[in-house]
Image (spheres, rainbow, N blue to C red):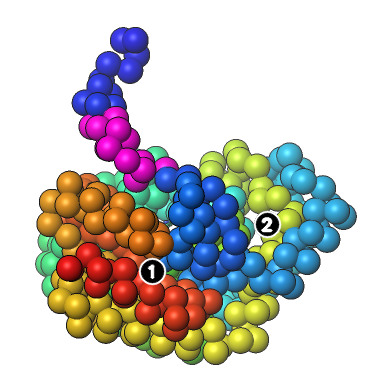
Amino acid sequence: MRLYDKFSRLASEREQFRMTGINPFGTCIDEVFSATEGRIGSQKVILAGTNNYLGLTFNVQAIAEGQAALANQGTGTTGSRMANGSYGPHLALEQEIAEFFGRPSAIVFSTGYTANLGIISTLANHNAVVLLDADSHASIYDACALGGAEIIRFRHNDAKDLERRMVRLGERAKDAIIIVEGIYSMLGDIAPLVEIVDIKKRLGGFLIVDEAHSFGVMGATGRGLAEATGVEQDVDIIVGTFSKSLASIGGFAVGAQGMEVLRYASRPYIFTASPSPSSIATVRSALKTIAAQPELRQKLWDNAVRLYEGLEKLGYELSSHISPVVPVIIGAKEEGLRVWRELIAAGVYVNLILPPAAPAGITLLRCSVNAAHTHEQIDAIIQAFAQLKK
Ligand code: PMP
């Protein structure tokens, strides 16, 4: 027992949540019918809390290509990219991602988490200084800890605060690594990238942008926030994931030719198994779909506006801008849990986010729309929220 004693508070808190109804932590989606519908227990629900932004998880072509890869290349690679886990399609996908971004190099990792770990921990070693947005994803923090870099946090999305801290660094600013995200996953807000690039141009440093939630979602061709804001040439490395718009699992980084050397130094690249052939095949297929169907992005934003405006009209407290992530800010934890369960009973699944996962100590219901939601489904989500007001 002693081994787990230090978790006793956490365990009892979580147990209390579990005893009072459906467990919000690791909710079991018992059946998935499509990109927008599933079943939790006996309740059929609209899935409005995923990262499946372009709704491609049930794309017919991707499924066919995934099945063919499974049949032709087997269920798994059973090895790391460095050893026996690099197949032709892994290299082909790297080439395709590099071409999609118009950059010399792309590296495929096993998840988005390991992409951040693999790139950042290797560059941000104990001699380095990293300037991080305070609301950075756990994988970015973990990467810095693994690398041993000195971490300086700046206030979320506050370019002025970043600049002050860069100035304080003096000469060291020239080699500092600045890390921000495209769309932030909880509040759906975006980094002030133009201002950050301006700071980098004046004071030096290298810039890494994690486009996990903005790839496929922003930019004329879906390359993300850097494309949307016209600053791609000033971003040194873009990191992304296959687990959101690309509807699979795995991660990537794109950058200059020099980035290739990280393959020989990055422990999270070397010491974990590579993505399975079926995952790689579905990503290749989804990437082609994203390039060929920009209308998916239009549909996504159309749905985002519809949900945001509907919830705003009902008087819910939302974030100040519209994005495919629509956070509904709720008061206390208990209230959040109650509302979350009532939404499921009304046929709508969203993510319940409690502090510290939600920034600034708030509780929120993280709604997210995708390109496959119909207007009827978006209206049903709004209707479920309307019922709660009564
Ligand atoms: N970066 C960000 C900003 C994320 O939100 C996430 C996942 N939520 C990741 C990286 C990790 O991606 P993956 O789930 O593919 O490991």
Residue labelled with disc 1? 368
Three-letter code, disc 2: Ser
Note whether 203 is above or below 179 in the view shown: below
Residue labelled with disc 2? 279
Magenta region, residue range: 13-26
Q: Dot 2: few (<14), some (14–19), or many (≥20) neighbours within 10 Å?
A: many
Q: Quadrant of the N terminus?
A: top left
Q: Nearer the viewer, residue 92 or 2?
A: 2
Q: In the rendered structure, does residue 24 fall within the stretch colored magenta?
A: yes
C-alpha distance separating marks 1 and 2 = 23 Å
Please name the residue shown 45% across and 65% down the image.
46
Three-letter code, disc 1: Ser
Please name the residue shown 46% across and 61% down the image.
45
Q: Nearer the viewer, residue 245 or 140?
A: 245
Please name the residue shown 34% across and 66% down the image.
367
Mark before the other along the chain sequence, 1 or 2: 2
Q: Quadrant of the C terminus?
A: bottom left
Nearest to the eye among marks 1 and 2: give it. Answer: 1
Note whether 253 is above or below 333 in the view shown: below
Numbered circle sitting on residue 112: none
Q: In the rendered structure, does residue 312 fall within the stretch colored magenta?
A: no
Which quadrant of the picture is home to ligand 1? bottom left
Callouts 1 and 2 close, C-beta under 8 Å: no
Q: Is residue 261 left or right of residue 205?
A: right
Q: Is residue 248 left or right of residue 164?
A: right
Q: Is mark 1 within 8 Å of ligand 1?
A: no
Q: Is residue 313 left or right of residue 275?
A: left
Please name the residue shown 59% across and 65% down the image.
34
